[in-house]
C-alpha cells in the first residue's frame, strides 16, 4: 500500500512539474552587484556559463538566488552559499537553511536552473559543474559587497559539490575571474571523477561527505581523489557513511527509487578521469578537451553504465547535519 502511494505521488509530481512552465524571476531585471541583507530577498545577479576555467570569451547570464536571515539580528554575520545538484532546488534543502539560520548564518540559496530554462538535468551536461561553481563565486562576490558579511562558506550537493572540491585548490582559485575566496566548503555526495596536476597546493578547508553505497557519484572516486591528493592534508575532512545511497538526505526518496536511464558513474579509467590543465581546460587523462554540452554528454555516455538507485537514510541525514554544523562553526566562526 505504501509503495503504491509513493508511486502515485511521484507520478503526480512528475506530471505537474513537466507541464508547468519554467518561471524566470530575473527575466528583464538588471543584475545587482551589491546586496542589502536587511531588505533584499530575491537577488538577480550576473554569472558565467562555462565548461572550463578559460574565461576569455564566455556567455554571461543573469540568474537568481534567495537570501535567508537568522532570527537574531547582529552587527555582522557569517554566511553560507548553497548550491543544489542536477535535480534542482528541492524542499529537502530547507532543513539545511533552518540549521544554518538557527545558528546565526545568512544563507544565500542559488537557483542555477530557472534562468537557464531547465527543470532538472538527467544528462548532467546542460549545466557544467564549472558553471555551478561560477554561480557560487558570483554569489560570494555579491555577499562580500556588504560590510556586514564576514566569512562565507560553500555548501553543495552532487554536481553542485564539484565546486566545493575545486575551491580547495589554490590554482583553481587563481584561474577564477572573481575577487573573493570562500573561507571553507562542504561537498555532499559529490562527483569526484577528476584529478589535478602535480602536487597542487590547497588552501580552502573542505569537508567531503559520501555514501558508501552511492552508485551515481561513487564513493570510490572520492577515495581515489583523497588518497592521491588529500592524504596528508590537514585542511580536509572525509566522512564515509555506511548503507547510504545517493540522495540519502531527501525524504521524498523514503522507499528508494531506481532510475534505469541515469548514468552509473562507476567506470574509472584514463578516458573517464578528468583533469584541469594549466590553461584551465577540462580534459580526460588521454588529452581530449571537454568544453561543450555535446562533448560533456558524450563523455558521460562513454564513461557510465545505466541504472542507479537513490534512497533516503534518516541516520545518514542526522550525521550529515551534525557534521555540517560542526564544520562551519569551526571554519567560519572559529569556535
Image: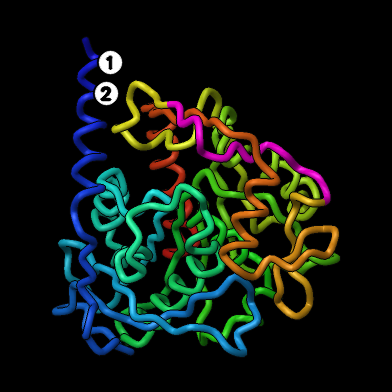
Label 1 – label 2 distance at C-alpha: 6 Å
Instruction: Judge from the rendering whether residue 126 lies leftward or rightward of residue 227; answer left or right.
Output: left
Residue drawn at 56 percent across, 64 percent down: 293
Q: Nearer the viewer, residue 126 or 281?
A: 126
Q: Is 112 rendered above or below residue 176?
A: above
Any magenta on residue 260?
yes
Q: Which residue is under mark 1?
A: 3
Q: Which residue is under mark 2?
A: 7
Query: How far across and down, in percent of the image, does residue 5 sit?
Result: 20, 19
Any magenta on residue 46?
no
Quadrant in which the N terminus is drawn: top left
Instruction: Judge from the rendering whether residue 111 lies leftward or rightward of residue 262; answer left or right.
Output: left
Q: Is residue 69 visible?
A: no
Q: Nearer the viewer, residue 160 or 164?
A: 160
Residue drawn at 82 percent across, 58 percent down: 285
Query: How far across and down, in percent of the image, does residue 32 sit?
Result: 28, 87
Q: Is 97 rendered above or below residue 167?
A: above
Give the magenta-colored segment's residue range. Answer: 258-270
Residue drawn at 23 percent across, 14 percent down: 2
| Image marks 1 and 2: residues in contact by CB distance under 8 Å | yes
Quadrant in which the C terminus is drawn: bottom left
Instruction: Judge from the rendering whether residue 241 lies leftward or rightward of residue 99; answer left or right.
Output: right
Mark 2 crowdedness (10 Å alpha carbons): few <14, some 14-19, many ≥20: some
What SS does tag 2 mark?
Answer: helix
Amino acid at each position: 500500500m505504501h509503495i503504491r502511494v509513493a508511486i502515485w505521488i511521484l507520478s503526480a509530481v512528475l506530471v505537474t512539474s513537466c507541464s508547468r512552465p519554467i518561471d524566470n524571476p530575473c527575466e528583464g531585471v538588471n543584475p545587482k552587484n551589491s546586496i542589502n541583507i536587511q531588505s533584499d530577498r530575491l537577488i538577480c545577479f550576473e554569472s558565467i556559463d562555462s565548461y572550463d576555467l578559460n574565461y576569455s570569451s564566455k556567455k554571461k547570464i543573469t540568474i537568481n538566488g534567495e537570501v535567508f536571515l537568522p532570527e537574531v539580528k547582529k552587527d555582522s554575520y557569517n554566511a553560507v552559499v548553497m548550491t543544489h545538484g542536477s535535480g534542482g532546488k528541492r524542499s529537502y534543502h530547507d532543513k539545511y537553511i533552518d540549521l544554518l539560520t538557527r545558528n546565526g548564518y545568512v544563507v544565500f540559496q542559488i537557483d542555477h536552473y530557472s534562468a537557464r530554462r531547465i527543470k532538472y538535468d538527467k544528462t548532467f551536461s546542460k549545466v557544467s559543474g564549472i558553471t555551478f561553481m561560477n554561480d557560487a563565486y558570483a554569489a560570494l562576490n555579491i555577499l562580500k559587497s556588504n560590510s556586514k558579511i564576514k566569512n562565507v562558506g560553500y555548501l553543495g550537493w552532487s554536481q553542485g559539490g564539484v565546486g566545493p572540491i575545486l575551491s580547495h585548490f589554490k590554482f583553481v582559485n587563481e584561474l577564477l575571474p572573481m575577487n573573493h575566496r570562500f573561507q571553507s566548503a562542504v561537498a555532499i555526495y559529490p562527483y569526484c571523477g577528476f584529478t589535478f596536476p602535480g602536487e597542487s597546493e590547497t588552501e580552502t578547508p573542505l569537508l567531503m561527505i559520501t555514501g558508501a553505497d552511492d552508485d551515481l557519484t561513487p564513493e570510490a572516486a572520492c577515495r581515489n581523489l583523497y588518497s592521491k591528493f588529500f592524504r596528508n592534508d590537514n585542511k580536509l575532512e572525509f566522512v564515509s557513511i555506511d548503507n547510504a545511497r545517493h540522495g540519502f538526505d531527501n525524504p521524498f526518496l523514503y522507499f528508494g527509487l531506481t532510475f534505469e536511464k541515469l548514468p552509473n558513474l562507476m567506470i574509472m579509467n584514463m578516458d573517464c578521469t578528468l583533469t584541469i590543465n594549466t590553461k584551465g581546460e577540462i580534459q580526460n587523462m588521454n588529452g581530449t578537451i571537454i568544453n561543450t554540452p555535446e562533448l560533456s554528454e558524450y563523455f558521460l555516455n562513454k564513461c557510465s553504465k545505466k541504472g542507479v538507485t537513490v534512497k533516503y537514510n534518516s541516520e545518514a541525514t542526522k550525521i550529515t547535519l551534525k557534521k555540517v554544523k560542526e564544520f562551519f562553526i569551526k571554519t567560519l566562526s572559529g569556535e
